[in-house]
Image (cartoon, rainbow, N blue to C red):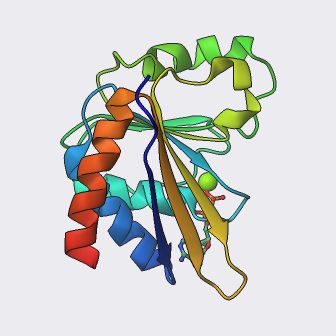
């Protein structure tokens, strides 16, 4: 497996987090998997909202905490937004098509909150985005690639977001 890349940024508003997320959207392909880590309220769903808007999703993107999975099919690419926070048993992952969404062969991009609850069911190749609240209202956003495919994704995204956002 290729060595992982790390890319780090700081945002000071929810809008800035969405703007950063929007710069990732053009590079997403069917089968891409993004795992979002961070405490409740860190900004994981805000990040997905930024991606969705940039993909052209018109529906309001809300937290899938109660639905576990919310999906959007009106953007450039199908978007699958998982939140495993309230899921208790591994077998339930089958019911929500989790394995086919994260096996790299899906027809859309999958964003997963609380994937770390099921360490035995981590995607094979994924971009991990960790969001940490910094006390003074800012968020530290660290992206790390696990696998060659996500490394490629992170490489192009990092270059582009640096040139767009400084
Ligand atoms: P999570 O999905 O990680 O539980 P949400 O995205 O639902 O968190 O909520 C993040 C909350 O933090 C929102 O209320 C948002 O307005 C607030 N917030 C404050 N500063 C930021 C920031 N820089 N980036 C993202 N969200 C922020
Ligand atoms: Mg959330």
Comparing 17 with 134, the one in front is 134
User: Compared with residue 165, is residue 123 higher up or lower down, i.e. above or below?
Assistant: above
The image position of residue 66, as x and y in percent, is: 67, 42
Residue 108 falls in image quadrant = top left
Residue 72 location in percent, x, y? 35, 40
Find residue 114 and report its image quarter: top right
Task: Work out whether 108 lies above or below 100.
Answer: below
Residue 58 in view: no
Q: Is residue 68 left or right of residue 81?
A: right
Instruction: Residue at 36%, 38% (x, y): give it.
Output: 151
- On screen, 10 above or below 69? below
Q: Is residue 65 left or right of residue 44?
A: right
Nearer-the-camera pick, 26 or 63: 26
* 149 relative to 130, above or below: above
Q: Quadrant of ligand 2?
A: bottom right
Which residue sits at x=65%, y=66%?
132
Quarter of the image for the N terminus: give it: top left
Residue 134 percent location from the top left of the image: 68, 78
Residue 161, quarter of the rendered image: bottom left
Name the residue at 33% across, 53% down: 52
Q: Position of residue 76 (x, y in %)?
A: 18, 42
């Amino acid at each position: 497996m290729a060595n992982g890349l790390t890319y780090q940024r700081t945002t000071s508003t929810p809008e800035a987090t969405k703007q950063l997320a929007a710069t990732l959207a053009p590079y997403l392909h069917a089968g891409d998997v993004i795992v979002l880590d961070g405490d409740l309220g860190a900004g994981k769903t805000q990040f997905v909202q930024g991606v969705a808007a940039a993909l052209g999703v018109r529906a309001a993107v809300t937290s899938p905490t109660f639905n576990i999975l919310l999906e959007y099919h009106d953007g450039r690419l199908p978007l699958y937004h998982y939140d495993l926070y309230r899921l208790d048993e591994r077998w339930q992952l089958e019911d929500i098509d989790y394995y086919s969404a994260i096996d790299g062969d899906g027809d859309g991009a999958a964003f997963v909150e609380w994937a770390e609850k099921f360490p035995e069911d981590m995607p094979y190749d994924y971009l991990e985005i960790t969001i940490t609240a910094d006390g003074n209202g800012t968020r530290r956003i660290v992206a790390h690639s696990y696998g060659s495919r996500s490394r490629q994704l992170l490489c192009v995204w990092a270059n582009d977001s640096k040139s767009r956002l400084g």
